[in-house]
Image (cartoon, grey):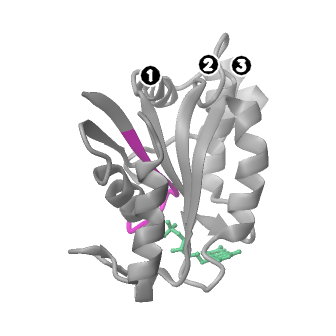
Amino acid sequence: MKKILAIGGSNSKNSINRKLANFAANQFTDSQVFKYDLSSFDIPLFSVQLEEIIGIPDLVLEFAKQVDESDFLVLSLAENNGNLNAGFKNLLDWTSRIKDRKTFGNKSMLLMATSQGGRGGSSVLDIAKNLFPRQGAEIKGTFSLPSFYQSFNEEIGITNEEIAENLNSIINEIIL
Ligand SMILES: Cc1cc2nc3c(=O)[nH]c(=O)nc-3n(C[C@H](O)[C@H](O)[C@H](O)COP(=O)(O)O)c2cc1C
């Protein structure tokens, strides 16, 4: 049984991206899903001076361990002002400072984004598509869900048939 780590790229308690990541991860067959909730952790703001004083926080080492112990990452990114959510960027900055490993641990990834607007986080998705491979992510598929509150229902998931089918076909093409 493959281990999937579902990550919402946001420090919001009610993150819609965490909901999408958890939903998409659960669509994979023969797999066990582990959920990473960044909003549960109080990770200090990275600076080189703080790093000199405290080293890498245990919470960050634990995140890297969860990545390393996974077979596959399902990540959905919040878009804030066209870019990564600051809390998630902070986690990535800390993680990138761990020696002898890349941020995403050379793991395969389904990379997604959703937002309440019609562009579905496409700006942050474009940034991450280019950036994350250099940070050790092997991107196997990308997906954007526009207008989250019109397109997603907590009980059944994606409500628009065409968009749901699009995600299914992306997932079906991924070999874990
Ligand atoms: C500071 C801030 C900036 C935002 N910037 C964008 C943006 O650039 N594009 C967008 O589509 N939505 C933007 N939004 C709306 C987010 O898509 C929305 O808050 C969404 O819930 C974020 O995902 P999350 O719930 O997973 O954190 C912004 C929201 C905040 C609070």
- Seen as rendered, the residue at the extreme top is 100
Q: Is residue 93 above or below residue 167?
A: above
Q: Is mark 2 on a helix, strand or loop?
A: loop
Q: What amino acid type should be assigned to the residue bearing mark 3?
A: Glu
Residue name at image x 57 percent, y 40 percent: 44
Q: Is mark 3 on a helix, strand or loop?
A: helix
How dense is the environment of label 2, judged by Cα within 10 Å: few (below 14), some, or many (20 and up)?
Answer: few
| Residue placed under numbered mark 2 in the picture | 55
Residue name at image x 44 percent, y 36 percent: 175
Q: State the image quarter where residue 86 is shown.
A: bottom right
- The region drawn magenta spans 5-15
Report x, y in % for residue 124: 70, 62
Report x, y in % for residue 113: 57, 63
Q: Earlier in the sequence, mark 1 or mark 3?
A: 3
Residue name at image x 60 percent, y 75 percent: 120
Res 28 seen here? yes
Q: What amino acid type should be assigned to the residue bearing mark 2?
A: Gly
Q: How many labels does the image show?
A: 3
Instruction: For the residues labelled 1 and 2, say whether their Cβ atoms are less than 8 Å apart.
Output: no
| Residue placed under numbered mark 3 in the picture | 52
Res 83 seen here? no
How dense is the environment of label 1, judged by Cα within 10 Å: few (below 14), some, or many (20 and up)?
Answer: few
For residue 175, the mark is none
Which quadrant is home to the N terminus? top left
Horizontal relation, residue 114 to residue 18: left or right: right
Q: What amino acid type should be assigned to the residue bearing mark 1?
A: Lys
Q: Earlier in the sequence, mark 1 or mark 2?
A: 2
Q: Distance between the residues labelled 1 and 2?
A: 16 Å
Report x, y in % for residue 93: 69, 36
Horizontal relation, residue 132 to residue 112: left or right: right
